Image (spheres, rainbow, N blue to C red):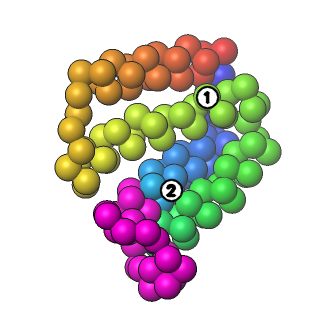
Amino acid sequence: MAFGGKGGLYLLATVSFTVCGQILLKKGVPTGSVLSLRGVVGNPFILAGAFFYTASLFFWLNALKLLPLSVAAPSASASYVLIVGASAIFLGEPLTLNKAIGVALVCVGVFLIGRG
């Protein structure tokens, strides 16, 4: 099944906004302390991350209207692939061999499911 048209665009937006939201949320979480309500409300990274993550829900619902769930849900796992890369770039997290193999397996699975 092709991902063209509006369904594919909604899926692309879902994945993009999910990745941005996750990276921003991670950047906003303080290390070594318990997160308080004040820390959440006053943290621009967490607020922006929550916005992106919430917006991804609306794109996801529109993607579900137009694509079969059996294609859309596995294809949304492309966010896992992009999060591994974005985490290495923006958070300095190591890109290990195990992560690379996992990313490759996810890509193969998404490709096979996308073909129908």
Tell me the kind of residue under disc 1.
Pro
Is residue 14 covered in magenta?
no
> Against 30, is 39 above or below?
below
Write the residue at 32% across / 27% down. 99
Q: Which residue is mark 2?
A: 17
Q: Main secondary structure of the magenta part?
A: helix
Is residue 32 covered in magenta?
yes
Q: Which mark is residue 74?
A: 1
Q: Earlier in the sequence, mark 1 or mark 2?
A: 2
**Disc 1 element:** helix
**Disc 2 element:** helix
Whole-Å distance between the Cαs marked 1 and 2?
17 Å
Q: Position of residue 28 (x, y in %)?
A: 38, 68
Q: Quadrant of the N terminus?
A: top right
Horizontally, residue 112 falls left or right of residue 91, namely right
The span picked out in magenta is: 23-47
Write the residue at 66% across / 34% down. 72
Q: Report whether residue 53 is seen.
A: yes
Q: Report whether residue 6 is seen.
A: no
Write the residue at 45% across / 37% down. 80
Quarter holding residue 77: top right
Q: Quadrant of the C terminus?
A: top right
